[in-house]
Image (spheres, grey):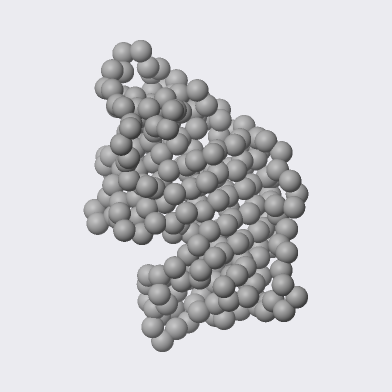
Amino acid sequence: MIRSYKLCMLLFIVLFSSGCTQTNDTNVLPEPSAIVKNITQVAESLESFSVEVIDVINENETYVYRIWVQGEQSRFEGTLPQFGKVTQVSDGDEGRLYLEDRNIVFIHEPGKAYTIQSEGTPSGISGDSATDWTFAKVEYPLILDLNGFDVEVKGTEEIEQQQTIILSLTNQATGIEEITWWVNIETWIPVRQQIEQVNYSRLVTYKNVKINEPLDSSLFELNLPADIYVTEDIQELF
């Protein structure tokens, strides 16, 4: 079973487009408790998945990437401003981060914190000159665990021919309405997520989501050039 936490390796949402219809008629929709139960059942049944993600931060930073996970194996493909084209594969014990534009592969331990020492803060990284980077295990890029949130049904909306329920999630600890979900009413998989905080916004769109379908083992292999430079020193990435 795949435990479902927020993807935190990448920094890791196209703005709402025209053609979406919305209604606030919640009379025929399931109660929040039933919706939470359905989403929880999906989370607990996850054995494998693949998904395309469009992630927009503060309306001016856009990241597009794909993720595949099966058991302990995972693959990530995307483009990052500071690295260019990136592919990461992991078997749960060892991760390999391949920077294609620089022909370098970084061997790392998933979940381990690596400290970057620099005279200045590297581009795209916030923090002091000594910065900890954690290459987290790639998991489903969404909080499917609703513990700690109060859930309110806001209505329905059709998104790309998918009928969705709009959910507002309020943090029970802070009382702040932080997250909005658009959940497919048939599969109970979120297809869009919006986060609004002070000086921070994020809109994530999930496309071509496939759950519990067998994935080819070749996805979790890296075909590297013969002249690839291999390092276990994170400092060499910057």
| Outermost bottom residue | 119
The N terminus sits in image quarter = top right
Determine the residue positioned at 40% across, 17% down.
30
Residue 117: percent from the left, percent from the top?
48, 82
Q: Position of residue 34 (x, y in %)?
A: 45, 20
Q: Looking at this rendering, what residue extends furthest in the left direction? A: 198
Residue most toward the front? 19
For the point 51% across and 53% down, the residue is 65
Residue 205 in picture, x, y percent from top left: 43, 43
Q: How many marks?
A: 0
Is residue 42 in sight in this rendering? yes
In which quarter of the view is residue 27 placed?
top left
Q: Nearer the viewer, residue 84 or 31?
A: 84
Position of 4 with respect to 181 (left or right) is right
Residue at 56% across / 28% down in the picture? Answer: 41
Q: Quadrant of residue 158?
A: top left
Q: Is residue 236 above or below residue 150?
A: below
Q: Looking at this view, is 202 or 99 the one in front?
A: 99
Q: Answer whether residue 36 is visible to the viewer in this image.
A: no
